[in-house]
Image: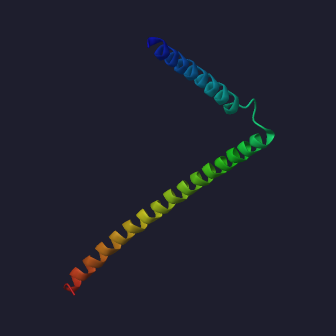
Amino acid sequence: MEAPKQRRCALRSKLCIWGLAVAVALGGAAGCARHPSQEELNRLEEARKAAALAEKELEAKKKEKASLEAKVSKKREELRKLEAKRDAVKAKLGGK
């Protein structure tokens, strides 16, 4: 009775080992390429150029935003001063 169980266990072990060996071999063969093709290199270079251009545009937009925010801040300060002047004139006229 013990002999058939041992045979089945040994057979399962061998099948598992062979299965793992085949999986490793297929994964290694299919997963690795020697070198990128010229087309892939060209696409990579185009992507790098596009990224560099996008970064330059981003910096330009950040500078523009900072400039606009400074203008808004200046205009708000002018508005505050003019409102204070208006309120002073109203007070002198009797609160009308």
Viewer-side residue, 54 vs 24: 24
**x and y, in percent, of residue 91 in the image:** 21, 80
**x and y, in percent, of residue 68 in the image:** 49, 62
For the point 55% across and 59% down, the residue is 64
For the point 49% across and 17% down, the residue is 9
Q: Quadrant of the N terminus?
A: top left
Work out which residue is located at the far bottom of the displayed protein and give it: 96
Left or right, residue 88 beside residue 17: left
Viewer-side residue, 4 vs 88: 4
52 over 37 or under it: above or below: below
The quarter holding residue 32 reads: top right
**x and y, in percent, of residue 31 in the image:** 66, 32
Viewer-side residue, 73 vs 11: 11
Viewer-side residue, 35 vs 9: 9
3 over 33 or under it: above or below: above
Q: Quadrant of the C terminus?
A: bottom left
Left or right, residue 82 beside residue 25: left
Left or right, residue 57 beside residue 81: right
**x and y, in percent, of residue 44 in the image:** 71, 42
Left or right, residue 40 beside residue 72: right
Work out which residue is located at the far left of the displayed protein and give it: 94
7 over 54 or under it: above or below: above
The quarter holding residue 16 reads: top right
